[in-house]
Image: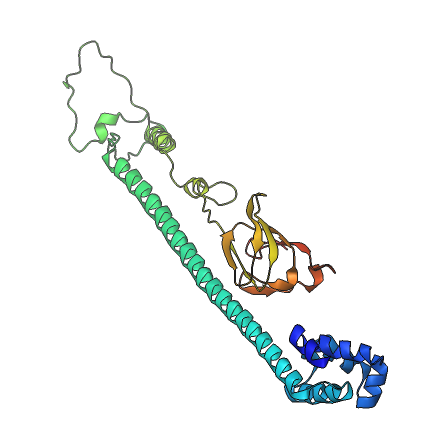
């Protein structure tokens, strides 16, 4: 009877439970006979080997249980060791997937940083070159402009009781009475020196107001050139998933577009970069390892009893909570 059970089943915990039921023993009775806690007996039957501190203690308790229910110790221990080796390989594969995903995230993060730096440098160079080109054009236009004709007038002294002297008397070379004027031209009396200086000041003011102003600032201290140029750089969020078993996987980006919607199997991986937040649905969250923006995501708080998880991943790079 015992040999038939060993040939049919590959689960040592189930074999122990079946043998105990045939002998009509309760878990408490087995625990009393082996001087163990009832939770330890249940852990061996349910194959929850992570609750044992080491494989040495597990195998010792396992042998005692086999002797109590009249099972072949060596064959049962051999079956147990085979099961432990299989689980260790699965754990090693999961760790390898996690390390590979983390390395992939690090490489992509470095690439994003390099792209952002290049965009900043190119944008800064464009702003500087545009500004200096505009200033050089303004300076060139000012140099090529036709200068305003002006007269060099010397100051004259006028007495309070005498009228102001005529403009012609202030020149280095005195004017003669027989200076020729153009035909049909009437001689106009020249204003006083103070009035002449006021006229020249008004002329300079009008000239300054007529010239175009460049680099003018508004009440916030921002130049018109700077206001016309805006720097915009996209920010991407990376998402990686590694699957250790069958799991339905759905991913939607910030625009509500479905990026992935398919059944994943053990060994499958997903790597994606786009605009967050992401809407994620997992059929069995216990079969998935998620890496978001270089950080491993704990799915315990999102996972229902049936293993299904549905949640939203928001990016810290976009200032989202």
Quarter of the rendering containing residue 22: bottom right
Residue 64 picture location, percent across and down:
74, 89
Q: Is residue 82 above or below residue 108?
A: below
Q: Is residue 5 visible?
A: yes
Q: Quadrant of the C terminus?
A: bottom right
In this rendering, position of residue 252 left or right of residue 183 = right
Quarter of the rendering containing residue 247: bottom right
Residue at image position (38%, 39%) is: 214
Q: Quadrant of the N terminus?
A: bottom right
Q: Nearer the viewer, residue 306 or 295?
A: 306
Residue 153 picture location, percent across and down:
25, 33
User: Looking at the image, how many numbered discs can be counted on the residues?
Assistant: 0
Quarter of the rendering containing residue 151: top left
Residue at image position (69%, 56%) is: 308
Residue 210 picture location, percent across and down:
36, 30
Residue 111 picture location, percent across and down:
42, 59
Q: How is the image coloured?
A: rainbow
């Amino acid at each position: 009877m015992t040999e038939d059970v060993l040939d049919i089943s590959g689960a040592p915990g189930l074999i122990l439970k079946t043998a105990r039921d045939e002998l009509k023993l309760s878990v408490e009775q087995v625990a009393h006979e082996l001087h163990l806690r009832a939770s330890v007996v249940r852990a061996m039957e349910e194959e929850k080997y992570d609750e044992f501190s080491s494989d040495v203690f597990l195998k010792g308790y396992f042998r005692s249980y086999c002797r109590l229910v009249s099972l072949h110790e060596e064959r049962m221990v051999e079956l147990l060791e085979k099961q432990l080796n299989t689980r260790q390989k699965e754990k090693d594969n999961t760790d390898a997937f996690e390390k590979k995903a983390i390395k992939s995230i690090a490489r992509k993060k470095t690439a994003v940083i390099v792209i952002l730096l290049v965009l900043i440098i190119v944008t800064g160079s464009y702003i500087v070159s545009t500004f200096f080109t505009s200033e050089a054009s303004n300076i060139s236009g000012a140099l090529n402009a036709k200068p305003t004709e002006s007269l060099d007038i010397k100051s004259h002294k006028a007495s309070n009781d005498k009228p102001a002297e005529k403009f012609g008397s202030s020149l280095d070379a005195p004017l003669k009475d027989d200076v020729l004027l153009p035909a049909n031209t009437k001689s106009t009396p020249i204003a006083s020196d103070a009035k002449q200086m006021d006229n020249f000041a008004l002329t300079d003011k009008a000239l300054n107001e007529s010239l175009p102003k460049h680099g003018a600032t508004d009440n916030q201290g921002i130049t018109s050139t700077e206001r016309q140029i805006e720097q915009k750089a996209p920010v991407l969020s990376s998402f990686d998933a590694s699957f250790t078993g069958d799991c339905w996987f759905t991913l939607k980006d910030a625009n509500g577009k479905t990026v992935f919607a398919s059944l994943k199997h053990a060994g499958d991986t997903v790597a994606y970069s786009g605009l967050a937040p992401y809407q994620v649905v997992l059929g069995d969250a216990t079969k998935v390892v998620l890496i978001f923006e270089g950080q491993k995501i704990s799915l315990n708080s999102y996972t229902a009893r049936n293993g299904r998880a549905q949640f939203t991943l928001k990016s810290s790079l976009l200032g989202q909570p």
